Amino acid sequence: MRYIRSSGWVLAVVACVAIGVQGAVAQGANLPWKDKTLSADRRADLVVKAMTFDEKIRMVHGIGWGVLRPGDPVPADSNHGAGFVPGIARLGIPKIDQADSAVGIRQAAYDARYATLLPSVLGLASSWDLDAADLYGKVIGRELRAWGTNMSIGGGMDLTREPRNGRNFEYAGEDPVLAGNMVGQLAIGVQSQHVMGDIKHYALNDQETGRTTVDVLMDKRTMRETDLLAFEIAIKKAQPAGVMCSYNLVNGDHACESDYLLNEVLKKEWGFKGFVVSDWEATHSNVKAANAGLDMEMPGEDYFGKDLRKAVEDGKVPMARLDDMCHRILRSMFAAGVVDDPFVRRVVDPFQGREDARHIAEESIVLLKNDAGMLPLHTGIQKIVLIGGHADVGVLSGGGSAQVDAPGGDAVTHEASRGWQKTVYFPSSPMKAIQRLAPGAEVVFVSGTDKAEAARMATGADVAIVFATQPMSEGHDAATLALPDAQDELIASVAAANPHTVVVLETGGPVSMPWVGSVRGVMEAWFPGIGGGEAIADLLFGAVNPSGKLSITFPKSEADLPMPVIPGMQKRDANGDVKNVFDMSYKEGLAVGYRWYEVSGHVPLFAFGHGLSYTNYRYSGLKVSATGVQFEVTNTGSMAGAEVAQMYVRLPAAAGEPFQRLAGWALVRLAPGETKTVTLPLDRRYISVWDVAGNRWQLTPGEYGVHVGGASDDAGLKATVPLK
């Protein structure tokens, strides 16, 4: 039993008793859809036939904002998540409790519970490890079940067209093949725990500036080969319960009422059998949205409550369409197992969560620079000075609806919950982890607020490690790629004082590095999660050999971006909002991310796919056929490691795409001196162009260039193959 507010205990008791009675009635009734031998579709059909009109309407919208907006209702059996749809006890259909869970479950502190903070999804994507993605989803799924929640509304995957996007840390980078496969596997992991999964934000929600008013103008070929390809891969791979449509407009229509996106592409072409749920307050109509393919309004009933009921009664929305909406929701519930295997609330295991988060962080962290073998540090080192980033107490996390509550409160301020878009540090101290790995060393921490003091303290140390941070959050974008709070000047001062300076970055995405030539090492830790402090220390000292590779290009400066200034940023009002609809035509078009740098001639600071190791790898023996490639990778160093071997393909000139595409990869784990043979299939969908007239993928006949290597700018093996 849960007490509702301070005076609602009577309501809670009555509600629990009522639910128990209704549940008992349902269990004793003749419910043919309880037959597990039937398909999920057949079971859903049987339930829909037994539902009343009122029950159908009640199933396709949420009930209030709950704890997200003060004063709104919190249903007695709600789990205090972001969304709630009541069950139908007489039919044995459970409620739907939805929780924000992009990198862990949000709002744990509200319910006096614990949730594991995982590394950012951008970091996960930089592991290129499908097993890590599966584990990531399993952690979220098992904790949702323990909480008593049966649907995740994580699964973010919008491609990085805007590297200053405040939500990039929730997404999986700039390449559709990498992002689609990683997020798809994450969703599989979630749903393996009998929790409904979600993939979002469909589609082209690639910046936060004016996110509810930007109208993305994009031709069908560009959409299909970039952002929509990522969604196609993930959705077909995972078959998620839900797809969340986004806030923005696409070619004049809100995404949640786009017939092209929802009906034509998602449901008809891709065969998606789940339901489309709106982002919160992204529903703008009843008739148009319902007929365009939106199945569930969240979080309230402004359009899909009494207004939808009237629209059905008036024949503007066919009853068959309402039945389809309910069918899709019910089918997803049966397919995910939330009906047959209902959750049982229990205590989350924080120790297992922390170990899993630490493991994922160790695979996600990318070693960007390591001059003269500065790293790994040796355990006999005498003096280490740590500077900035609150590295004495914790690691940075991302804000907005992805914000997980820190156990014990923010590690810096000790506040239990810091609210929307606030900067929160988690209690995983890099300093303490470094002290454990170097027990004989003097380890000193300096806040970095005074750059002169930091430089003085760094002088003479065996190594100075600067922890640089970039707080990022849903709801706003960074104006520049520069580190905030004069951290560039701090790093430059420390590097001038100590030639053995290493920078550890905790950022939501790429940052510029005007000091990069003055430091010996750079490590990108992203937002590393509850085990991040330990993971950072493990990689600094070589307890773990870094294997992460960038899932996103690091530009040298804003001048090298397709849009040096974020469109719409100049249209913001005093509150930072963009009130009026404005058009957005992405200059790069098909050339997203690393492709842009190839066609524009700009040399990035660090290329897509780049990442160093403490060992070395040699590629050899490339063989290419019409169906795939084969080659060998050898660990030529003295330390075991894992290499992300990447395959890029250049299309014939007739395709009109003067850039290479990622077409596959393999994570190869090798002992010192070991050689392994790698075989990668040549998936034609990844190397085809979208034929708009024929509405199909089309392979351009001709010679295809195949490049294999350790990064997008380091593909040492090359061959060609004719395809038709």
Image: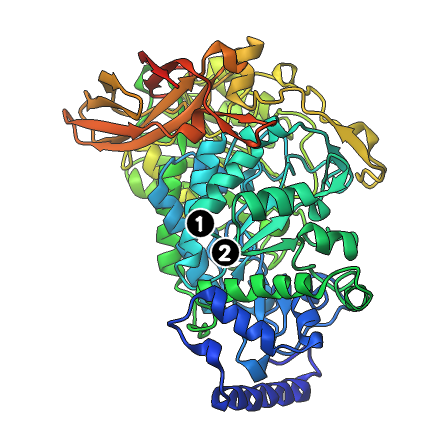
Query: Tag on residue 115?
Result: none
Report the amino acid beneath label 1: Ala
Q: Which residue is mark 1?
A: 238
Instruction: Measuring from the top left, give residue 295's x and y in whole percent.
Output: 65, 58
How crowded is the residue under tag 2: few (<14 C-alpha within 10 Å), some, or many (20+)? many
| Quarter of the picture holding the N terminus | bottom right
How crowded is the residue under tag 1: few (<14 C-alpha within 10 Å), some, or many (20+)? many
Q: Which residue is mark 2?
A: 197
Instruction: Measuring from the top left, give residue 467's x and y in whole percent.
Output: 49, 32
| Quarter of the picture holding the C terminus | top left
Residue 578: quarter of image: top right
Q: Secondary structure at mark 2?
A: loop
Q: Secondary structure at mark 1?
A: helix
- In the displayed structure image, the side of residue 309 where residue 375 appears, left or right: left
Kindly indicate whether the residue at mark 2 contacts the one at mark 1 (C-beta within 8 angstroms): yes
- In the displayed structure image, the side of residue 68 where residue 116 appears, left or right: left
